[in-house]
Image: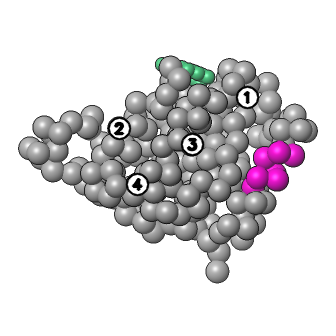
Amino acid sequence: MNKKIITLGGSSSQKSINKEFANYAAELMENITIESLDLNEYQIPLFSVDLEAEKGIPADVLKISEQFKATDAFVLSLAEHNGSYAAAFKNVMDWISRVDGSIWKKKPMLLLSTSPGARGGATVMATALGSFPHLGATVVESFSLPSFFDNFKNDDIVDNALKAELLMKVKSFEKAL
Ligand SMILES: Cc1cc2nc3c(=O)[nH]c(=O)nc-3n(C[C@H](O)[C@H](O)[C@H](O)COP(=O)(O)O)c2cc1C
């Protein structure tokens, strides 16, 4: 049976290049079913311990946590804002951690990042590689695509070396499914 993969961009931008990149990477795989999530589809307020004590966990936080539980794997691409997670993504992680400390449910993850800059989100990637294992992630492979608008054109990676590297990592990730 096809494995179910959640794709997610760690961004609330409606034109998120990370959402696009996560979907691109998942579409390179065979015999999978993609569930593409968009943070804009969830009504999730800014986390505070006071709001949580007053109103409890928002319904959409419970919903996304259940969606994470029901998937077989993740392809997540992180946006980088000032060297760290985009606030909307961090907010969702903080809320989910109040439902279940194992945010990523021990499922295999292909962890990506991209940005228009030459480092392709390498700083947020390093942060995630350090902390995600403590948040229940099983990061099988990771890859940062630099200079998105130079290297990704007409829905494809145009730099042969970068594409070959990603394909190799996608194959390795598929074996872990
Ligand atoms: C507030 C803000 C901070 C940013 N900081 C960084 C940064 O630290 N490093 C970087 O490579 N790009 C940075 N950028 C550019 C983002 O990488 C770019 O907006 C990218 O499109 C974000 O990914 P997304 O399209 O998936 O939201 C920043 C953009 C914003 C709006």
Residue 78, percent from left and from top: 56, 38
- Compare marks 4 and 1 and give the one earlier in the sequence: 4
Which residue is painted at 45% across and 68% down in the image? 70
Q: Are marks 4 and 1 in contact (CB under 8 Å)?
A: no
Q: Are marks 4 and 3 in contact (CB under 8 Å)?
A: no
Q: Quadrant of the N terminus?
A: bottom right
| Label 3 sits on residue | 129
Name the disc covering residue 176, or none.
none
- Compare marks 3 and 2 and give the one earlier in the sequence: 2
Element class at badge 4:
loop
Give, as a single range, the part of the protein colored magenta: 164-170
| Labels 4, 3: front one | 3
Q: Relative to 165, is 142 on the left or the right?
A: left
Q: Disc 3 residue type?
A: Leu
Mark 2 and mark 1: span between their CA atoms? Answer: 25 Å
Element class at badge 1:
loop
| Label 1 sits on residue | 146
Q: Disc 2 residue type?
A: Asn
**Label 3: few (<14), some (14–19) or many (≥20) C-alpha neighbours in 10 Å:** some
**Label 4: few (<14), some (14–19) or many (≥20) C-alpha neighbours in 10 Å:** many
| Label 4 sits on residue | 103
Q: Disc 1 residue type?
A: Pro
